[in-house]
């Protein structure tokens, strides 16, 4: 295929009048040609109602007041008891026990759920058309890797519909895409410049042009299992509605083998090899990961796609699927990603995630009674526990360690209160050791124990991005904090 055949569309946003814009001409020097082409609007332009979107922003409502009141009560109780942290034990210890036991059980018995199954996969003639969305922004260095990744997919080329989504002002990535000889099933869409400049906005735009019955999202750094699409299509074929989504596990590789990357990889293993499988086994709602989500495209369009204003549109969509009466399962065919290579990228990525969790929580707690009726009480409780845990693990752990240290220095030793607290804390950490032994099999024993021993430092490190995310939400700063990725 020549560069002249590269299918590049440059449609306008639906809110602007239909007119003409130049198309990208990759066969010549990468630039915008002067020859215009009539604008073709997307056949479907999803737009989530404001009542279900983060577009309204997070507001300081009753839920925030309750959370603030709980913090004030805890601090006041400690001060009133002369700095004795024991007054908080009835709150912390049950949480530790309730967390420790499922971790031990899940690590021992659920680690096998992400291994590729021996289920017979569909033959080529029975496979549906599969749309693949790959949104990119300022990721020219990743384009060659994406080009090579698409060659590895075990799926009939004539049933693939790959959409590379590039932003209007990202000339560098456009040039990188123009330099490659893409297969005939690939199209490059230029997303018009409009607010909000987010990944879900680009995905919604691509959804309008998708031709498949099924759809998946991949990030720039993703390397999915070669049979992942075929396995997803087979799973959807075997199980009809209400199954609407399949989440593939994300396997993180720490190329530079730095401590931060290893902790990031351990965190992902706990999430995708334990937490999400445990929730799906219990038939509870799960927050989707940001990539390798497989959908029935009809359901995705019925839900109006993604929330373009939400910085964790994946988590939000996972809960909207449940509210719509649909289910999600784990697909045992993993996608490999690399970890952030430096603290700056990790901090920006983590801030974006935590900001999105705050948005998701506010959106689904605007009308808690109505949402509880739609999602069910257990799903609503699971959502609050998962989001609260992600948001509070850093600050709460940091505060608890500080209070323990203060209590020790004030009393000059380990009294009954501290000994009791440390006993249950040791049980909690012992559960993490068990999890590390099963979930971090790629590392030697000493490295696994080292990662668990230094895990409290990683949790403390989560405090600054958590506080910054709260500050951004209070200021209604919804900019997408981009993190950079490097090719493998």
Image (spheres, rainbow, N blue to C red):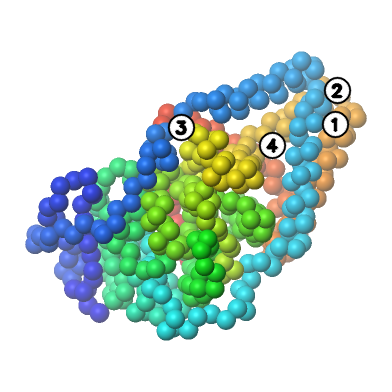
Left or right for 471, reference 105: left
Residue labelled with disc 3: 58
Total numbered badges shown on the rendered structure: 4
Q: CA distance from mark 1 to mark 2?
A: 10 Å
Q: Would residue 193 appear left or right of 450 to someone viewing this image?
A: left
Judged from the image, the secondary structure of the residue bearing numbered disc 3 is loop
- Which circle marks residue 397 in the picture? 4
- The Cα atoms of the two marked residues, 1 and 4, are separated by 16 Å
Mark before the other along the chain sequence, 2 or 4: 4
Mark seen at residue 418: 1
Image location (x, y in percent) of residue 257: 60, 59
Q: Residue 84 in the image: x percent, y percent?
A: 80, 22
| 49 over 297 or under it: above or below | above
Q: Circle 4: is it few (<14), some (14-19), or many (20+) Cα within 10 Å?
A: some
Answer few, some or many: residues within 10 Å of disc 3's Cα (few below 14, many 20 plus, some between 14 and 19). many
Q: Position of residue 212 (x, y in %)?
A: 36, 69
Q: SS for tag 4?
A: helix
Whether pointer 3 and pointer 1 mark residues with C-beta atoms closer than 8 Å, the reply is: no
Instruction: Give the residue number, with chain letter if any, for mark 2.
Output: 411
Task: Say which label, 1 or 2, has the lower sequence index.
Answer: 2
CB atoms at circles 2 and 4 under 8 Å apart? no
Residue at 76 percent of width and 44 percent of height: 98
Is label 1 in contact with label 4 (beta carbons under 8 Å)?
no
Q: Is residue 394 above or below residue 155?
A: above
Mark 3 or 4, nearer chain start: 3
Q: Is residue 457 above or below residue 2?
A: above
> Can you give x and y, in whole percent of width and height, for residue 307 in the image?
40, 46
Query: Label 4 near label 3: C-beta < 8 Å?
Result: no
Camera-near label (3 vs 4) is 3
């Amino acid at each position: 295929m020549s560069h002249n055949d590269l299918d590049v569309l440059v449609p306008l946003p639906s809110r602007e009048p239909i007119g003409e814009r130049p198309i990208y001409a990759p066969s010549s020097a990468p630039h915008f040609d002067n020859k215009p082409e009539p604008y073709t609007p997307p056949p479907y332009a999803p737009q989530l109602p404001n009542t279900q979107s983060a577009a309204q922003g997070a507001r300081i409502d009753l839920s925030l007041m309750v959370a603030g009141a709980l913090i004030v009560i805890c601090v006041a109780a400690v001060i009133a008891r002369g700095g004795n942290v024991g007054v908080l034990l009835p709150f912390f210890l049950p949480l530790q026990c309730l967390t420790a036991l499922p971790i031990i059980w899940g690590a021992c018995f659920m680690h096998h759920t992400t291994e590729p199954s021996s289920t017979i996969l569909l033959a080529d003639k029975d496979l549906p058309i599969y749309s693949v969305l790959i949104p990119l922004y300022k990721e020219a260095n990743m384009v060659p890797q994406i080009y090579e990744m698409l060659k590895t997919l075990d799926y009939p080329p004539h049933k693939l519909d790959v959409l590379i989504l590039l932003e209007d002002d990202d000339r560098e990535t456009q040039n990188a895409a123009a330099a490659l000889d893409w297969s005939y099933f690939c199209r490059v869409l230029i997303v018009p410049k409009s607010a909000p400049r987010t990944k879900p906005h680009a995905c919604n735009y691509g959804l309008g042009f998708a031709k498949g019955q099924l759809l998946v999202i991949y990030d720039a750094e993703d390397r999915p299992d070669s049979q992942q699409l075929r396995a997803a299509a087979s799973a959807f074929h075997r199980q009809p509605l209400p199954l609407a989504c399949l989440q593939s596990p994300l396997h993180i590789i720490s190329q530079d083998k730095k401590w931060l990357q290893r902790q990031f990889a351990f965190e992902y293993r706990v999430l995708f090899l334990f937490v999400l499988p445990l929730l799906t086994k219990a038939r509870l709602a799960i927050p989707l990961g940001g990539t390798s989500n497989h959908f029935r495209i009809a359901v995705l369009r019925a839900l109006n796609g993604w929330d373009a204003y939400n910085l964790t549109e994946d988590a939000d969509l996972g809960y909207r699927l449940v509210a719509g009466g649909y289910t999600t399962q784990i697909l045992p065919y993993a996608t490999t990603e690399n970890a952030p290579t430096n603290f700056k990228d990790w901090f920006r990525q983590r801030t974006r995630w935590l900001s999105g969790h705050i948005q998701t929580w506010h959106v689904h707690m605007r009308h808690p009674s109505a949402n509880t009726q739609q999602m069910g009480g257990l799903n609503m409780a699971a959502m609050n526990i998962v989001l609260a845990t992600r948001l509070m693990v850093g600050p709460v752990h940091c505060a608890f360690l500080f209070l323990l240290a203060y209590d020790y220095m004030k009393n000059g030793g380990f009294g009954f209160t501290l000994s009791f607290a440390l006993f249950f804390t040791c049980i909690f950490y012992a559960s993490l050791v068990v999890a590390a032994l099963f979930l971090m099999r790629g590392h030697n024993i000493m490295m696994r124990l080292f990662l668990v021993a230094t895990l409290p430092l990683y949790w403390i490190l989560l405090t600054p991005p958590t506080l910054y995310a709260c500050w951004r939400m209070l200021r209604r700063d919804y900019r997408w904090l981009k993190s950079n990725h490097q090719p493998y």
